[in-house]
Image (cartoon, helix red, strand yellow):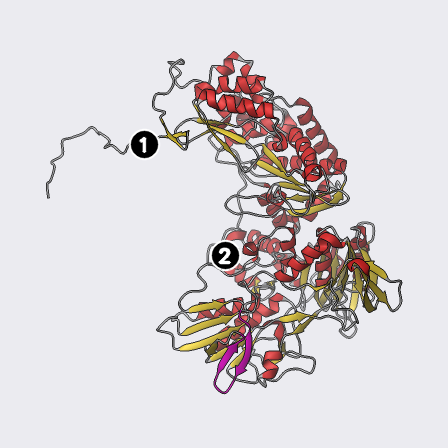
Amino acid sequence: MSQDATHRLVVVGNGMVGQRLVEAVRERDVDRRWRITVLGEEPRPAYDRVALTSYLTGTSEEELCVVPDGCYDDGCVLHVGEAVASIDRHAKTVTTAAGRVVGYDALVLATGSSPFVPPVPGADLDGCFVYRTIDDLDAIRERAGVAGTGVVIGGGLLGLEAANALRSLGVDTHVVEFAPRLMPAQVDQGGGEMLRRKVEDLGLSVHTGTATERIEQLDGGRLRLVFADADPIEVGMVVFSAGIRPRDQLARDAGLDVGERGGIVVDDGCRTSDPAIWAVGECALAGGKIYGLVAPGYEMAEVAADRVVGGAAVFTECDTSAKLKLLGVDVASFGDAHGAAAGALEVVYADPVGGVYKKLVVTDDASTVLGGVLVGDASLYAALRTMVGRPLQDAPEQLLMAGPAASGLDDTAQVCSCQNVSAGAIRSAIGDEGCCDVASVKACTKAGTVCGSCVPLIKTLLAQSGVEASTALCEHFDLSRAELFDVIRATGIRTFSEIITRHGRGRGCDICKPAVASILASLGSGHILDGEQAALQDTNDRFLANIQRNGTYSVVPRVPGGELTPEKLIVIGEVARDFGLYTKITGGQRIDMFGARVDQLPAIWRRLVDAGFESGHAYGKALRTVKSCVGSTWCRFGVQDSTSLAIMLELRYRGLRSPHKIKAGVSGCARECAEARGKDFGVIASETGWNLYLGGNGGFTPRHAELFASDLGSDELVRLIDRFLMFYIRTADRLQRTSAWLEALNDEHGDGLGYLRRVIVDDELGICGDLDAAMYAHVDTYADEWAAVLEDEEKLSRFVSFVNAPDVPDPSIQFVTERDQIRPADQPADPVPIAGPTLEVMRR
């Protein structure tokens, strides 16, 4: 603990809101007058409970953690796994279940809420769960492996999240909702019906207006749900997700005021009936309301933090607008979504065929926006929400279809509800702070850093402030890569000199030349070392190998799906032995051979090609690997033949040039041994087909791929991957990975995956036939690059260390032996002689 601090703050609870309060206090307490002690009940630091479902599909605890590095130090300590048992308000101490006694000058209760379990007989049977914590999800995952069928009781926001989780685990899922529609708190009857249709299209069974009477235990661990007015159903597991109840028992025991239906009563400064104690988040009853969203909790945390350090911040009624993606369906509601205001008028657009429902609620004189509901297409959410309470500047139907012009937003309009950032604050960040793109606005204002739904509006405000982000490829081309790709495709130009003469300027550079080389290769313009193309390639592509630190090259033959016969394995061993190469098995199911001189590459590859190997394209911006597990062929948990699918996909896309390298994975079951969700495209087997994930990557900023489609047959799966890859290759920027490309689609269209689905599934742009044809052309014309080199003396002549002495190997390449293999010798650190005047040597 800091010795300079003079005040003691104790925070009970380390959820998202409790953590936010700690950070808010530290931001304000610049003199470090407060020593902070945080007591968390769970055995881990705060994590993103909003994204909890992603834990079941591969996101780790570490990735969900919301505690920034350096948050806790000698002035701020966190004790996890230590629940608080009591508060002594007279002595101003809290006592934990472990017996720790901590004194306080200020105490903040951030105890959150607990899941509501309806009081039905049998709710405590084995096989019944709640959906709240990582530990809950671990238990659900274990049961799902044998359940087969499950039911979620609760069709609200949390219930549909839980249903999505069960579905992702391969469980045949029912949703039971007491109200007559799904998400009754957020959407109206029309929106609920549209949502129900979309959810049922995904294979879930929905039972609305259904009351559960009891749950009965059956033989073999199965459960029977008996309803008041419907036939019973038998399932393997039950998940309760029917709402929350504030965790206020600690406050009750301490004699603090609580509401009749629960919740710690707080004033507009988030202070309880004890002036030394505050309450924030889902445990607090503010203005007679319990807020079950994170945004109001964050706002309470900011208010309480300000008050603790002596400020006068006030918590007013908070915006409960929400934009969600549930089971892949966009759902949003804002303002007076149900038209509860006297005389409120509703303007509705419904497209049952397209699965879109939009409603705008306005005052009785149609002069002011009150609220709205969006289902199926929530791209206008951010813009429409800012209009709530403001005079209508356009006809309601025009607002509903096209949205308001961002120029009409005054500075007080709230753009980011999660972080409470106004249009004025963003304009100030652009004008005063020099922010010139979305990333800098995010860093400056925090807008767009939680749910991201306001990012399209931030881009609009940037554009309207005169900030124009250049998309030019480089100083030699005014066109973006995507525009250049279209020009080359449409004109049929196949030489760099003609391309730059007609559409650029100068002689080109190391940015535009490889980019054009990649585009030409993607369009099937012959071998990459043919004619003028050879001069465009970077070093690795020029020698069809990766250059290493000592000037040698690596050799990586393709091993489709990681499957390798003993005969080929022996060939690799013999080649490595005969040429003295270092060998290593990689994480991508390849055998890398290191230490080859450039003049050795043709001889090495001749041995490999004769044995049936092809180039692994480890040097290129192209498909690298399709990793797989052994699937149902060998694994007792596998449900599909992942190895055969991985081999087929790798052979189909081998040699496909793209803006960035592409990696893929196929897992034979939900255990995900191929780590498919960390790839550009990942395939995970389900009981009835394949689930397709898009946009993952490893590297500096790892990102899990997102679920794009479920339970696909093999033909449909391949068709979607074909179109995904071809659309990416045509429209991505230079060196833009699929993950960054999808995030850019999010910025541009509000929902990147939704837009992609409209393009490659619904054929909204009418280009699917063209994308299919392009992929067929690639598959039909593929030829191994190294085999072609070996048959061409002109190409072979490039593989020499010295142009003027082609038979002389590079004498500077030196190796030493380590663990019975070679490695580059360390470079000597001898003085470097220089020429010049004689300098006097000073002796000291």
Q: Nearer the viewer, residue 241 or 795?
A: 241
Which residues are the magenta region? 82-97
Q: Is residue 761 left or right of residue 30?
A: right
Please indicate, yes or no, whether residue 494 appears anywhere in the rendered image: no
Q: Amino acid at mark 2?
A: Ala
Check if residue 248 falls in the magenta segment: no
Q: Is residue 650 left or right of residue 424?
A: right
Q: Quadrant of residue 364?
A: bottom right
Name the residue at 61% across, 58% down.
451
Q: Secondary structure at mark 2?
A: helix
Q: Position of residue 424 (x, y in %)?
A: 55, 63
Q: For marks 1 and 2, give the CA distance.
A: 42 Å
Q: Say which of marks 1 and 2 sits in front.
A: 1
Q: Which mark is residue 443?
A: 2
Q: Nearer the viewer, residue 624 or 82?
A: 82
Which mark is first along the chain, 2 or 1?
Answer: 2
The mark total stands at 2
- Residue lying at the far front of the rendered structure: 219
Q: Which mark is residue 759?
A: none
Q: Which mark is residue 827?
A: 1
Check if residue 95 falls in the magenta segment: yes
